[in-house]
Image: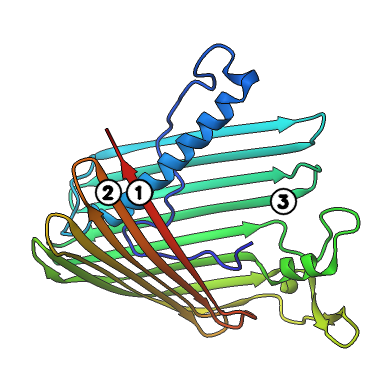
Amino acid sequence: MKKVTLLTGSAALIAALSAPAFAQTEIAAGADATGISGINDRIIDVEDAVQDDFDRDNDDARFGNPDRREGLFGSIALTYAGSTGNTESQDFSLAGRVSNNAGPWQQSVGMLIEFGEDDFGNKDKEEVSTIYDGAYYFNDQFYAFVLGRFSVDGLANGEADYDGQPDNEIAEKLGDFARDGFIGVGPGYRVINTETTAWRVQAGIGYRYTQTGAQKAGFDLEYDPVTDSYDRVAVNDSSDSGVGYIVSSRLYHRFNDMVFITNDTDYLSSKDSDDVITNQFGVNFQMSDQLATRVSYTTEYQENRPIRTDNTLGVSVVYGF
């Protein structure tokens, strides 16, 4: 489970909310019983994930105010799946977004609710998030942004999710954020804005609020290697809040019609909460009209974690014929 939700630049905060798409579960008669439908759904998931990777690099706000739909519009989607028998699981998700674009002013509000139980009927997700993303474009180079997010993790506490849950799993939950919010405003500027190279930077000031599971529960569990056990330690502070700062950079450069690179960097800091730094470097190859490849390397740093840095190598390939 990730310890922190990462804030990105004003182009997007969360890409999980999108317009609803409807498709048949069964692609042919007999597909469900033979397992074809399940595999077909996974194929669609992989295709969508790969397309999302390429779409994020093809940032529509790269060169200036993107040409977006005008007026007020939005969508809402709900999904539920529950199983009984050999497994006892449930998954519920509700997502929605409302957007309003009027000339240089663009803004959207999003909501995401997720509840889940694993195959043994134990709760494994209980999260609610809201986001706000706004931008005002003075011209192709200079803009102002507003970012807001508030997330609640109902499982980040000192209570066992099922009988006999080991202390190391409870200790992990205590280290997660039970509540995590940020609201910030600031200017953005396109330092370079040519047909082959685009680089924009932005910096903002705001207010950050966090509460760990340990702060919510009033205690933490610390591992003692001598006894190979966890000791209960009292936690007196109930939350952390204060002025927060966010600095972001978005760099794009196209070498030729076949190769372009991107480098996205975000730094979130506040006095009492952990600093968070993310960097994603991507190389995109359009080898032909049918074949495209993207290789990315993502680094996520969070202050005060036992292992502060996570690194992820990603490879996406699309071939059409």
Task: Look at the image and tell me whether residue 97 can be seen.
Answer: no
Q: Who comes first in sequence, dot 2 or dot 1?
A: 2
Task: Look at the image and tell me whether residue 302 can be seen.
Answer: yes
Q: Vertical placement of 228 versus 124: above or below?
A: below
Q: Residue at x 63, y 32 (%)?
A: 80
| Picture coordinates of residue 94, whole percent (x, y) | 56, 39
Mark 2 sits on what residue?
292
Which amino acid type corresponds to the residue marked 2 in the rendered image? Answer: Ala
Quarter of the picture holding the C terminus: top left
Which amino acid type corresponds to the residue marked 1 in the rendered image? Answer: Val
Mark 2 and mark 3 in contact (Cβ < 8 Å)? no
Alpha carbon distance from label 2 to label 1: 6 Å
Q: Who comes first in sequence, dot 3 or dot 2?
A: 3
Secondary structure under the numbered disc 3 in the rendered image:
strand
Mark 3 and mark 1 in contact (Cβ < 8 Å)? no
| Picture coordinates of residue 96, whole percent (x, y) | 47, 40
Q: Who comes first in sequence, dot 1 or dot 3?
A: 3
Alpha carbon distance from label 3 to label 2: 36 Å
Q: Which of the colour schemes (rainbow, by chain, secondary structure, one colour) is used?
A: rainbow
Secondary structure under the numbered disc 1 in the rendered image:
strand
* Lateral position of residue 1 relative to residue 247, left or right: right
For residue 199, which quarter of the picture? bottom left
Crowd around label 1: few <14 · some 14–19 · many ≥20 (10 Å): some
For residue 21, which quarter of the picture? top left
Mark 1 and mark 2 in contact (Cβ < 8 Å)? yes
Mark 1 sits on what residue?
317
Mark 3 sits on what residue?
124
| Picture coordinates of residue 52, whole percent (x, y) | 37, 48
Residue nearer the viewer, 162 or 149:
162
Q: Residue at x 37, y 63 (%)?
A: 296
